Amino acid sequence: MIITNDMAKNNLKDYSNKNNKISRDIRDGKLFKIITGLYETNPNTPGYLLASSIYGPSYISFEYALSFYGLIPERVTTVTCATCDKKKKKQYNTDFGVFTYRDVPVIAYPEEIILKVENNYSYQIASPEKALCDKLYTLTPLSNYSNLENMLFNDLRIDQEEFKKLNNKKIYKLSNLYHSTNVDLLAKYIRRNENE
């Protein structure tokens, strides 16, 4: 269970020096520090369940989500998350893993986010279509379909069969929200292939 510093102190009303008691609980393996002011009671909690508590508002996206959905073959160990209007990238190295956070456009941020519940934890993750658009948004602008194909299937190693399962309508809708050359190109590429 995730516990904030305030929650921990509220549970320690009988202690005069609450900070010392929290430090002892960490030393004795009763609490496990995630970041300053945030703790977990179970050291085996998977990092992705903690991501939105570490820095937010945020949702899991980019490579971690692409791997989660089987769109890329690699197992991604860094939990990659999207934020909005934060203006800078953040990285946290914790005992529960490495977490990175970076902005996507404010207008695109709330679209296509899925709320999942697992073992009394809830977390938000981008849909497969949103995760791909988020990733393309962060890359250097591409100039043509050939470059896009190379980026998708060689550089990112997107599984072509999984790519074909994506919901085209969701990508068309999302492409209007990013003002991104790459996301626009993806929508045009899918539309062209649909018409062939």
Image (cartoon, rainbow, N blue to C red):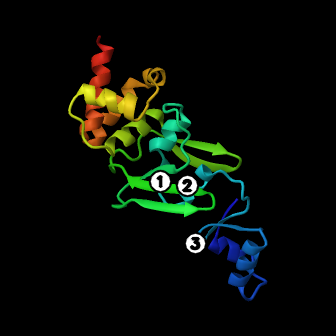
Helix, strand or loop at label 1? It is loop
Label 2 close to label 3 by CB (< 8 Å) = no
Compare marks 2 and 3 and give the one earlier in the sequence: 3
Q: Which residue is mark 3?
A: 36
Label 1 close to label 3 by CB (< 8 Å) = no
Label 2 close to label 1 by CB (< 8 Å) = yes
**Identity of the amino acid at label 3?**
Thr
**Identity of the amino acid at label 2?**
Ala
Q: Which residue is mark 1?
A: 58
Helix, strand or loop at label 2? It is helix
Q: Is residue 51 left or right of residue 134?
A: right
**Identity of the amino acid at label 1?**
Ser
Q: Is residue 175 left or right of residue 93?
A: left
Q: Quadrant of the C terminus?
A: top left
Helix, strand or loop at label 3? It is loop
> Residue sitting at 77 percent across and 68 percent down?
29
Pointer 2 local density, CA inside 10 Å: few below 14, some 14–19, many at least 20: many
Residue 51: give its label.
2
Q: Is residue 119 above or below residue 148?
A: below
The alpha-carbon separation of the residues under discs 2 and 3 comes to 14 Å
> Residue sitting at 26 percent across and 25 percent down?
146
Residue 170: give its label.
none
**Could you tell me residue 28's position as x and y percent?**
79, 72
